[in-house]
Amino acid sequence: MAGRIRQSDVEEVKARTNIADIVGEHVSLKSAGVGSLKGLCPFHDERSPSFHVRPQLGYYHCFGCGESGDVYSFLQRMDHVSFTEAVERLAGRVGLELHYEDGGQASDHGNRARLLAANQAAAEFFVERLGAPDAEVGRRFLGERGFDAEAARRFGVGFAPKSWDALTDHLKGRGFTTEELAASGLVSQGDRGVYDRFRGRLVWPIRDVTGQTVGFGARRLLADDQGPKYLNTPETAIYHKAQVLYGLDLAKRDIAKTHRVVVVEGYTDVMACHLAGVTTAIATCGTSFGVDHIKVLRRVLGDDSGIGEVVFTFDGDAAGQQAAMRAFAEEQRFAAQTFVAVAPDGLDPCDLRLARGDAAVRSLVDTRTPMFEFVIRHTVARYDLETVEGRVSALRAAAPAVADIRDPALRPGYTRELARMLGLELAEVERAVRSAASRPKGTAAGGDRRGSVASAAPGNGQQGSPRDQAAAADAPTRPFSITDLPNDPSTRLERDALQVILQYPDAVGADLLRHAIDCRFGNATLAVVRDAVASVLASPEPAIRVDRVVEEVPAPFSGIVHQLAVAPVPQRSEAELAAYVTGVVSALVDRELLRQKSELLGRLQRADRADTATYTALQHALVDLERDRRALRGD
């Protein structure tokens, strides 16, 4: 049984780990001021970034959904691991040997960790077997598609031998149990026991955004293989096909850097694009591109400014066109602009690279067509424009696509283009577009969905437009936020002072810090946090750390502490930061001194002048207090 990790090791691992590196594997982070980063929250769907990370403090907080914590809680939430597994994973990353109390051992039998280990061992097995004599059919398949041994190595392509138990025996020899292999989806269960799921096939490892192998996609090669053309890992505890994107681990950095992602349809298309220089290509794994994929991509893309691009490549056949229409049904979930790239002769990127070279693949992406333009043309092409009925039906079907164009400056131009395509008067088309814009989304003329663009996407039974659905999904019940605090100058000062005290206690300085925690707070919520800071300073180890302050406050206030700890300060440079930190805390102390001065003046007015000792003491106190105020201000 795993023992408890020594607390000193837990703290050392956290100290050596930059939380921004870990969060950055899932979320594209941008600067939000000195020492602060922000991005789209990985825990809920949102249109604008409210997820903040403070690397210096090692904490994150989302002002949209209220999730907060340190690097361990982030891994626990994102990867569904235990606390111990999170510590062990990060310890391995920074190269620190952990020590366990009571002679315990590392929890290498944790369920998720074991499934990941089994998949990694399988990936290594498949890669090794690609060089075996019986894998000639796999090597030939790759060669015919323009992929050499180096390309196969780069993408981890392997070969599953035509055997019922080669992989099973190999992994059992590595210490994995039958139950673990079944849970990982590497074996199937039959009347005579378990057998290898992938046999006689070329195999691609499917990795999550952090690069860990969570499953496989296998391509049929042999004539006597009666299975599907592509066979994927089934749903497991670590593999969810609606959430994984093939190639994202390789593409994520360039996606975040260029703000462009290219969505292709297959594993070989991803390989062809990357080898041709389109290094932002990814693909779904045996399922249509859906809402969960969009959520993953938006976080990596940093999709909040509208400057990004999402380029879909589809085969030119009917199935490819239908896939484009399905993508259009969800495209407004992106803030980025969406495009479609279809080669004139209908070739996919892999075949295009074979036929015309790398430059043709790059040109395909560079000459992309706006998604709405593609949809309008595809919609109109479904009707017989030689008849009045056909032109009217085409107008009713295409007008909603024009009305849904997000950039209002583009709508008039595409309204004119639609009028030209249909051979109708511009005024008639303008009326149709206005009518489509005023109707409830997802409803065609006449009150039903017949003839609407959305109806071209089979299975789309949701009510309301993708934009409306995204807005609804983006409006969770929001927890209390420090932005909900009163906006009067006094409360703002208390909030700002606590922010810098929690984030930059060393810059505040010990003397100023002691004065600050003695100040009265008018806001009751912030006063609780002030009291917790005072409690930490009064302890034998008076170092201000967020986790220690969280321990001191009542549970309902822990979120407030996390928010104050990660909220960006208004200064944008290190040079300005020191002055801001001391300035805002000094202002808080100055306010307290002013309050004390007011009290002393009141007492002085009420004092009996005959009581010379008391009267003189009050005057001296006022002089001392005024001296303190001048010193605080640097006068």
Image (cartoon, rainbow, N blue to C red):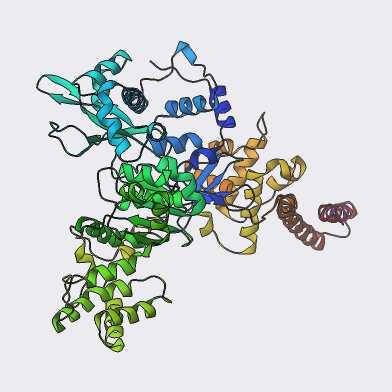
Q: Residue at x 21, y 59 (%)?
A: 460
Circle count: 0
Q: Quadrant of the N terminus?
A: top left
Q: Quadrant of the C terminus?
A: bottom right
Q: Image height check: is 396 above or below 505?
A: below
Q: Image height check: is 396 above or below 496?
A: below
Res 471 visible: no
* Residue 450 is covered by the magenta coloring: no
Q: Which one is in front, 93 or 310?
A: 310
Res 49 visible: yes
Residue 132 percent coordinates (x, y): 30, 21
Question: In screen coordinates, is 492 left or right of 117?
Answer: right
Q: Residue at x 37, y 77 (%)?
A: 411
The residue segment tinted magenta is: 618-624
Q: Residue at x 56, y 49 (%)?
A: 37
Residue 540 percent coordinates (x, y): 67, 28
